[in-house]
Amino acid sequence: MVQAVWWRRIYVMIVKELRQLSRDKALIGFFFWAFIMDVYLAGSGTSMQLVNAGLVVHDSDHSMASRELIHRFHMPYFRFDGEVAHPNEGVRRLDFGDAVVLLNIPPRFQESLASGEATAVQMQVAATHSPQGLSAASYGARIVGEFGLESSLRRMGMSTNGSAALPIVRSDHRVWYNPNQNESWFMSISEVLTITTIFSVLLPAAALVRERERGTVEQLLVSPLTPFQIMVPKVIAMTLVILAGTAMSLFGILHGIFDVPMKGSLLLYFTMTTLYVFTTAGLGLVAATIATNQAQVSLMTILVVAPMINLSGTWTPPEAMPVLLRDLMQLSPLYHFVTISYGIQLKGIGLDILWPSILAMLGLGGSLFGFGMWRFRRQFR
C-alpha cells in the first residue's frame, strides 16, 4: 500500500510537470523549432567543403597550356569570375572578398613546359575563412600537380595511361561509414546532440525555477512529498519530452529528409539517450538552485552548455585540440555520448565496443546528478 501511494505521487507529479510545460508557449515554440527546423537548417544549409570558390586569373601567357590549366578549375569546387589585367587588381578583389583564389600564370608558360624548363604558377588564397581557404589551396595544389605530371608525360611522348610504367605511389582511399562523405549526415547528427544537451540542462532547471516564480514552491514544501518526489518527476517528465523531440528529429529529419542510416540498435540508441538526458539533468538542477528566474536559467544554460559542446568533439575533432583540452574533454558526458551516438547510427556497433564510453558517461553523469540532488535537498532544508 505504501509503495502504491509512493508511485502514485510520482505519476501525478510527472503529469503535473507535463501540463505545466504545455502552458509555456514560448518554450514549446523554441522546442519544436530546435528539434525540427534547426536540425534541418544545420543539415541542409551548412557545408564545410569547398563549393563555388570565386577564382580570378591573371594570365600573362594566353596560350593553349594556360587555358587548359584554367579550365581545370571548374565547378562545383571553383567558380570562374573572369580575368584581371594586373595582379594588383586581383589582390584588390581578394581584399574586398569578391574572390577567394587569384591564379597568376607567368609569361612563356607553354614554352617552358615544352622545353622542359622549370616553371611555376602562383596561387594566392584569401584565408580569412580558414577552412575554405585551406581547402581551396589543397584543391588548387592537386590540380596544378596533376597538370604538371600530364605535361611532363606528353613531353616525353607518353600518354597518361603510360604512367603505369613509371615508379609512382598512388593513394587509394576507402571511405567507411559515410562513403559519399555526405555532410548533412554529420551536421544533422551533431545538431541533434547539441539541442539534446541544451534541453537536458534547460528544461529541468526551468521546471524548478518556474515553481519559485509562480509561488507554488511553498505549496510543495507543505505537501507530504519528499524532495526526491518533487525533483525526480521533473527530470522524468523533461526526459520524456526530450526523447519525443529526438524521435521527431530522428524519424522526421535525419531519416525522412537526409537519409541518415540507423545501422545499430534503435532501442540501444534511445536507451543511451535516456541515460544521457537523465544524468545531464544534474547540471540543470544545480543551475536551478542558483538562479532565481527563467532568464537567469537561460543564461546559465549557455554558460554551462557552450564549454560542453566546444570540448566534446561535436564540431571540432579531439585530435585537433591541444593535449590539455583533450584531457578536459574526458570530463564532459557529451564527449562520450558523441562516441556512442555516431557509433550506433553510422557504424552499427554495440555494447561490446561502446561499454567504456557508457561506463564513463555513467560515472560522470551519476556524479553530476548526485551533486544536483544534494544541492536541491540542501535548498529545501
Image (cartoon, rainbow, N blue to C red):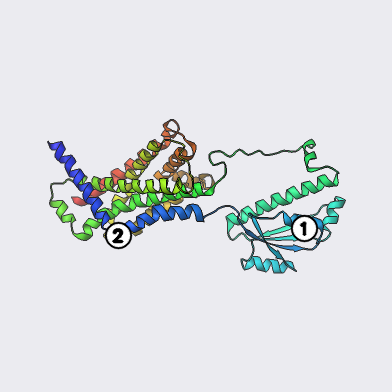
Q: Residues within 10 Å of mark 2 (few under 14, many from 20)?
A: few
Q: Using a 10 Å C-alpha cutoff, classify the residue at mark 1 as few (fewer than 14 neighbours), some (14 to 19) or many (20 or more).
A: few
Q: Quadrant of the N terminus?
A: top left
Q: Residue at x 53, y 44 (%)?
A: 319
The residue wearing badge 1 is 67
Q: Position of residue 143 (x, y in %)?
A: 71, 51
Question: Which residue is the extreme one toward the right?
Answer: 115
Can you tell which quarter of the image residue 156 is in?
A: top right
Q: x%, y% of residue 357? A: 42, 37
Residue 197 on image: x %, y % = 38, 49
The one nearer the camera, 36 or 308, is 36
Kind of residue sitting beneath label 1: Arg
> Is label 1 in a helix, a strand or a loop?
helix
Q: Is residue 379 visible?
A: yes
Determine the secondary structure under disc 2.
helix
Q: Amino acid at mark 2?
A: Lys
| Mark found first going from the N terminus, 1 or 2 | 2
Q: In this image, 216 relative to 174: left or right?
A: left
> Alpha carbon of mark 1 to alpha carbon of mark 2: how far?
61 Å
Which residue, given by chain and number where applicable, does mark 2 sit on?
25
